[in-house]
Image: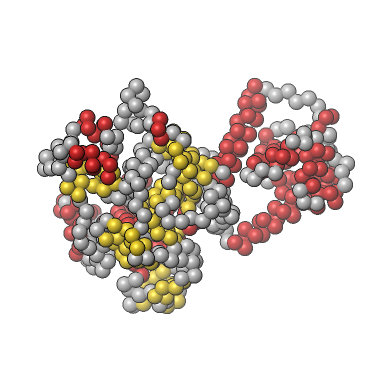
Amino acid sequence: MTLSYTAVIIISVVQAVGFQIGLWTVFRKAGVKGWLSLIPVYRIWVWMRQVIDRPWWWMLLYLIPFINVFMGYYMVWETIRCFNKTSYLYLIPGTLFYFFYLPYLGLMKKEHFTPRAELPEFRKSWARGWGDAIIFAVAAAYIFRTFFIELYAIPSSSMESSLMVGDYLAVSKYHYGQRIPQTVLAMPFMQHTLVFTTAVPSFVTWLELPYMRLPGTTELKDNDPIVFNYPDGDTVAIEQQDRSYYAIVREYDAILNPNAQPASLAYVTAHYGESFVAAVRHKHAGKSASDAVKADFTVRYRPIDKRENYVKRCIASHGEELTIRKGVVYINGKKAPVPKNRQFSYVAPGGGISKRVIKRLRINAEDVYTDAAGNQYLFLTDSQLAELRDMGKILVPQVDENYGYDESIFPHDPRYPWNKDNFGPIVIPEKGMTVPINDTTIVLYDRIIKNYELNTLERKNGKIYINGKVATSYTFQMDYYFMMGDNRHNSADSRYWGFVPEDHIVGKPIFVWMSLDKGRNWGDGKVRWKRMFRPIR
């Protein structure tokens, strides 16, 4: 259940009013004038010094952004203890729901305030001591990673060699503004699945907040590396989580739908074989593609902030026109800046590059493969390419020279004969921008309308209905971005699944704090020392 903005405002008002009533009444029980709780900032000083009797320098911590969130909860914890409540049964729910519990403590006559210095000595058991330490460590770390910096690992070579497999990133949440957690009921530090399981969700969707973001220190701009939630990951097939659920549905649709594009069926047949096509038709005759996929796989929905985290480079921002021709990116008709370590694919006929050379040049194992004919394919930076050619190696670039339909490329429609090297032109959607909607253009924007901006969308009798009304145009409610990996031929990015909405933006990678080469041993250069604490550009 996703709350509306009205519901969020009501809850916020309830929290503010409850907190104010609680602070006023607790002040009075502590022998402090209640009206002092109405004075912004000063009331924190009074609460800290006169109510819970904490040192003056705590105020300095409270004035530090994001740390003050932790300090506020800790002060509530200490206030509850002043009512001689030492059990976790009171402390944990009371702290989390302070806007109810503080008024209860302040208004109920049976609850008595005891100055901190007069509280009876509380002897902590070994278990209680560790429990307190763990609770405060988890709370502090959770607040820090939510509002300040979070650590991520690079799992794939899509940004190679700008960001390498084995790089561990520090990602800023404050550059573009902290996104308020939307999935409220979730296990801390687990993205979407409980540890030691492959399918048990780490969250429940009983309560979800709408998208809200605090002001940032900078604007997201072209060429920025960005961490974001995978837009195509709102639904996943658990047994094939490394693939797009929607790609699987498109493949099944090409097989089961008699009106599917012949090019789509040809693509599926070429990739999976006629026996696979025949088996799907036999097993799921008469079913829709989505029903057939649900019969073959465990299908799960994931909220925005529980989708996989991806890192790519923002190639184009909202309102800009993007075109890719022969692998060259153009923004508004001009060549886009080229990342220093951009990679393309090359073929070495006859598999001519030895493992020793591959290792010396630090070419990632994911960026080398050999086909059935023995031809070796490598994804290389310009510098790696130059070194190999200096050795006399023959390397043929694998760039598509012309436009041509590729089923895997967005928007997955033969009317847009685009491929990974020839794409667009297309304008990136911008908040407030209106576009015409018809049978041809709807394939560009249907996921935006349905999945990202949560409208109903139907096509009936040659007409398009949005929220039950005939529509010939659509006005976007959010800004969008186009992301690409620097490893241009080995990256699942916006060319394959489309635009990234603003509410999916997680943060900005700022530096590599650790880098380990999984292809090497500890005594053989496993730690990439030169990449340690290197700023990311």
Q: Residue at x 46, y 41 (%)?
A: 535
Q: Is residue 100 left or right of residue 155?
A: right
Q: Residue at x 23, y 42 (%)?
A: 386
- Front residue of 399/121: it is 399
Q: How many marks?
A: 0
Q: Residue at x 61, y 38 (%)?
A: 139
* Figure coloring: secondary structure
**Quarter of the view holding residue 290:** bottom left
Q: Residue at x 18, y 59 (%)?
A: 266
Above or below, comparing residue 211 to residue 372 in the picture: below
Residue 242 in view: no
**Quarter of the view holding residue 482:** bottom left
Residue 398 in view: yes
Q: Is residue 182 left or right of residue 344?
A: right
Q: Is residue 125 left or right of residue 283?
A: right
Q: Is residue 511 left or right of residue 460?
A: right
- Front residue of 100/373: it is 373
Q: Residue 437: horizontal and vertical position, in percent?
A: 38, 74
- Front residue of 529/319: it is 529
Q: Residue 61: horizontal and vertical position, in percent?
A: 69, 39
Q: Residue 302: horizontal and vertical position, in percent?
A: 45, 51
Q: Residue furthest front?
A: 390
Above or below, comparing residue 12 to residue 93 in the picture: below
- Front residue of 16/147: it is 147
Q: Residue 463: horizontal and vertical position, in percent?
A: 36, 77
